[in-house]
Image (cartoon, coloured by chain):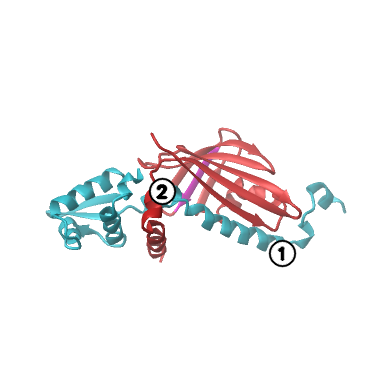
Chain colours: A cyan, B red
Amino acid sequence: MLRALADPHRRRILALVKHEDLAAGQIASHFEITQQAVSQHLHVLERAGLLSERREGTRRLYRLRPEALEAVRTVLGELWPDALQRLKTVVEKQQRRSPDNRAKPDNERRIP
Amino acid sequence: MSQSEVVTATITIAAPPATVFPYFTDPALLVQWIGDTAHLAPEPGGLFALDMGDTRVRGAYVTVDPPNRVVFTWGVLDSDTLPAGSTTVEILLTADGEQTIVELTHRNLPVDWRARHRDGWTRNLGVLEQKVHA
């Protein structure tokens, strides 16, 4: 999958189309490589499921697929550290709200 | 799939494992720290469905062993890159005094992710992500 991301041109393309739909020509204007080479990169990214394509008149517009972004974050190991940090915050907040529960097993807690 | 990678993450939480465990099995608790909506059937073979924005994570519980261990599969619906159920997430909760050490291991991730170390793709992606959510 992320072989598609190994190329710096392709990573720059993804950065360009993260917010807006762009035509191949607009994307190519950011590069010194040929438009044909850009088209090949777009094809690789599309096949990897990282880009979506839609037609507007005669133009094809490209954009980063948001669902691909989360998949990529998961693969790169970025998802979990952020998520576990939120887990810690949430659980510890709950612990502070009910201090009687702290470190007591269930059966002990139920004793009146 | 010729290559696979493992991602690990660890954190220590000031609460006992029995308090932390339901955050991996109760949908109302799970979505407090990851995703937006969840449908969970926490038993072996039971559904693990979590929607995170446009990302629909789908898998199944493999092991549910409260309060210390839970394993479920993880993938993205309609994704060629990370198909539903294609990877495995294991969570170990170990008591350490009044705290819990949470160790998460995400296995079978399909990648050549050396690109990450080569030129800051991780950082770029982080910026990308913040902007997408802005």
Tell me where residue A16 appears, x and y as whole percent: 27, 61
Tell me where residue B83 appears, x and y as whole percent: 40, 39
Determine the residue positioned at 76% across, 53% down.
Answer: B97
| The furthest residue to the front | B118
The reply, left or right, for residue A101 in relation to residue B34 is right
In reply to whether residue A12 is colored magenta, the answer given is: no
Instruction: Please provide the residue range marked out in magenta.
Output: B47-52
The reply, left or right, for residue B97 in relation to residue B64 is right
The reply, left or right, for residue A99 in relation to residue B74 is right
Within 10 angstroms of label 1, few (less than 14), some, or many (20 or more) residues?
few
Determine the residue positioned at 58% across, 39% down.
Answer: B71
N-term mark: 2 or 1? 2
Three-letter code, disc 1? Arg
Tell me where residue A40 appears, x and y as whole percent: 19, 47
Query: Which disc is residue A71 wearing?
Result: 2
* Chief secondary structure of the magenta portion: strand
| Same-subunit check for callouts 2 and 1 | yes
Determine the residue positioned at 22% across, 59% down.
Answer: A22
Give the quadrant of residue B82.
Answer: top left
| Element at label 1 | helix
In reply to whether residue B49 is colored magenta, the answer given is: yes
Which dot, 2 or 1, sits closer to the camera?
Answer: 2
B46 above or below B101? above
Question: Disc 1 marks which residue?
Answer: A96
| Element at label 2 | helix
Tell me where residue B37 appears, x and y as whole percent: 51, 51
